[in-house]
Image: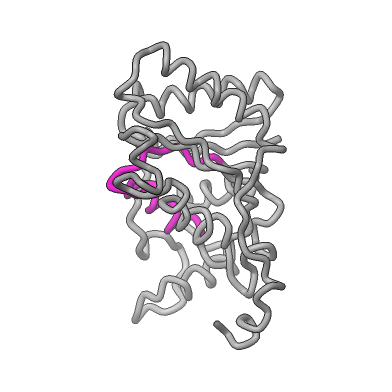
Amino acid sequence: MRVLIVHCHNEPTSFNGAMTREAVTTLTEAGAEVRVSDLHAMGFDPVSDRRNFTTVADAGRLHQQTEEAFASANDGFAPDLQAEMDKLAWCDVLILQFPIWWLGMPALLKGWIYRVFAVGRAYGGGRWFDRGVLAGKRAMLSVTVGGPVEAYSDTGWYGRIETLLHPIHRGILGFTGFTVIEPFVVYGPGRIDETARTAWLTRYRQRLLSLETAPTVRNPEIADYDGFVRRGL
């Protein structure tokens, strides 16, 4: 099994950092090949513009999808971006490791998605959901949140964590073809003691060892929506 971990936290000693280190150790010991894209350590540029490309489809106007499709057909992506695309194509399992900030993923990680999930490389040409470019791969969100579990419930301040993560599960990972594993969520790691944090890492280790069989989030199947597809909706 080949696993790509995209890690996004600006502090190496954070609990997110501990989770990524645990993942690398656990998966490697289990015989998996593991690669890590540590976005802060890499100095990854989240800004998506003409610097993405070494080719030009239309010099007069930047239309992102047009340029992405042209670059996909002509090996026209910048080397740093191509390297991340190659990792995505290489992996069997993608893990996105990040904290929930302001009820969403960090801007740096969102920028990685914007740039790497390009037309022709992650979607396009009618290839989405179960017919997606990345179909056959699995993906999992491994996230931390600042509050207790009660805050992310039907009666909590923010609503259910599943609702919060739905745009990522369906609109990004599911859309591009991934089979989406149920998320691993750590609640308030900054509010608990070392014994509790160690217990969370033990649970995470167990999840990592079951990536190929862990329960998944249901996403649409194109056959269920053929009428919409035929009408271009």
Is 76 situated left or right of 129 in this image? left
User: Which quadrant is home to the N terminus?
Assistant: top right
Which quadrant of the structure image shows residue 52?
Answer: bottom left
Pick whichever, 120 or 138, lies toward us: 138
Residue at x-position 33% and y-position 44%:
156
Pick whichever, 217 or 40, lies toward us: 217
Please report the bounds of the magenta region as a residue range.
95-117
Residue at x-position 69% and y-position 22%:
30
Which quadrant of the structure image shows residue 12?
Answer: top left
Is 98 situated left or right of 230 in this image? left
On screen, 37 above or below 165?
above
On screen, 1 above or below 220?
above
Place of residue 192 in the rendered image (x, y in percent of width and height, measured from the top left): 34, 19
On screen, 147 above or below 219?
above
Residue at x-position 35% and y-position 63%:
49
On screen, 65 above or below 151?
below
Check residue 187 for magenta coloring. Answer: no
How many numbered marks have been drawn onto this rendered protein structure?
0
